[in-house]
Amino acid sequence: MISADLIVAGCQQLLTCRGPAPKRKNGLQDLGVIEDGSIASNKGTIVFTGTEKEMNTKVRKSPECVEINGKGLVGLPGLVDCHTHLPFAGSREQEFLLRLQGTTYQELAEMGMGIQSTVRHTREASKAEIVSLCQQRLDTMLLHGTTTTEAKSGYGLNLKDEIKQLEALREVDRVHPVDIVSTFMGAHEVPKEYKHKKQEYIKLLTQKIIPAVKSKGLAEFFDVFCEQGVYSLEESKILIRAGKKAGFKIKIHADEFTSLGGAQLAAAEEAVSAEHLIAISEEGIQKLSNASTAAVLLPGVPFFLMQNKRAPSRSLIDSGAAVALATDFNPGSSMTESLFFIMQLGVYTQEMSVEESIHAVTLNGAYAVDRHQSAGSLEPGKKMDMILCKAPNYPYLVYHFGVNPVQHVIKDGKVVVKNRTIQ
Ligand code: NIG
Ligand code: FE
């Protein structure tokens, strides 16, 4: 008999999303569903998944065992948000109103608003303020089922303020149940002090800031915004090479508005992920189809920016790319913490199936932040990070849109959200 200190018995359906990761093509259709599914964990690690009947013969409850009745609930892995800009100060609803009157996101950026305006607010904020903002946002994420999130700096754009953002992330990671995967994104924009001397800022990044951030152990990934008017393909390559040399794993904001070839660069540089991809070329799709690089799609962005373009999810999936979905949570192009909403956008606006979009925010999301060994699926040996949603079956999670289905959240084997309330 296996000993367990937490069991969830008799879910309507248990979606294990079992690997191997990443899932591609038709593999994305099989969610590893167990009807009348049960799961047990011990000291934060999953020890059993199967039917309730099987569990009764194989699992012995320890004296202090916590038991949850899964009736009326669908269980699935804790969601993994593999692309966010979490540690920012201020908000940009005034720009949103200007956009409603017809000014575009890029025009706002050219007017010195956009990312630069969040840089101003973030530079002015203290570390304690950023910690507190992150805490509130992580609470919202947790209540909406996210148990692991990536988080990028990139609103400091100088050594001091980038480090302030990353240290805030480290502090909040220590006290909050949601796991944070940190990304250094000093190459998110060109700071306004370097507007006419971008090469100097690139030098500062490659020679000073990148090695300094690495030596402090503040981030695992390095990310660059490869885009017309920001960093060209050639500049992105120089930055990525410096990031790799320092020991970072790589992510790239690639082909978001213009087709610069960021996807090809990501594949060639063996980046862990290429993100956005709305303007990806045929060649880019082909390069990602057999690459280890994940294709992270962010349908909240064209929705929030009210653009008709979409990332070509169907071509990417059908050609074999490892597709994940994420919120891109940020104040300028996607102001939402809800991965359920993003999953719904994947289905309603990007021709993805329900099964593909669930995998895209669980196992493939975990793959896109290199956490697939421990998170993203419900399998013995992995961390007990799971959510229980009020629904009769899993298609209902997308069918009933725009509301939060999450009833309970379990993180590292502990119930951290019970009846929609953080414990
Ligand atoms: O992923 N594309 C660049 N960065 C963000 C937007 C950041 C902002 O507008 O503040 C993005 O869309
Ligand atoms: Fe982004």
Image (spheres, rainbow, N blue to C red):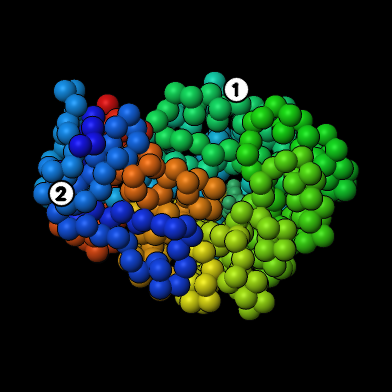
Q: Please name the residue shown 48% across and 60% down the image.
A: 22
Could you tell me which quadrant the N terminus lies in?
top left
Give the class, few, some or many, for how many residues have Cα within 10 Å of label 2's Cα (few <14, many ≥20). few
Task: Please indicate whether residue 397 sits to the left or right of residue 206 in the image.
Answer: left
N-term-proximal mark, 2 vs 1:
2
Kind of residue indicated by mark 2: Glu
Image-quadrant location for residue 166: top right
SS state under label 2 = helix
Image-quadrant location for residue 116: top right
Image x and y of residue 145, in percent: 33, 44
Could you tell me which quadrant the C terminus lies in?
top left
Task: Please indicate whether residue 106 sits to the left or right of residue 417 in the image.
Answer: right
Give the class, few, some or many, for how many residues have Cα within 10 Å of label 1's Cα (few <14, many ≥20). some
Q: Spatial distance from mark 2 to mark 1, Cα to Cα?
A: 53 Å
Q: Mark on residue 417?
A: none
Image x and y of residue 93, in percent: 50, 46
SS state under label 1 = loop
The answer to whether marks 2 and 1 mark residues whose Cβ atoms lie closer than 8 Å is no
Q: Mark on residue 54?
A: 2
Image x and y of residue 120, in percent: 66, 35
Image x and y of residue 227, in percent: 71, 60
Q: Please name the residue shown 52% across and 72% down the image.
A: 320
Whether residue 299 is visible, yes or no, is: no
Viewer-nearest residue: 332 or 408: 408
Viewer-nearest residue: 267 or 210: 267
Task: Please indicate whether residue 176 sits to the left or right of residue 74 in the image.
Answer: right
Residue with the mark numbered 1: 126
Q: Please name the residue shown 58% across and 38% down the image.
A: 182
Kind of residue indicated by mark 1: Ser
Residue furthest front as drawn: 1
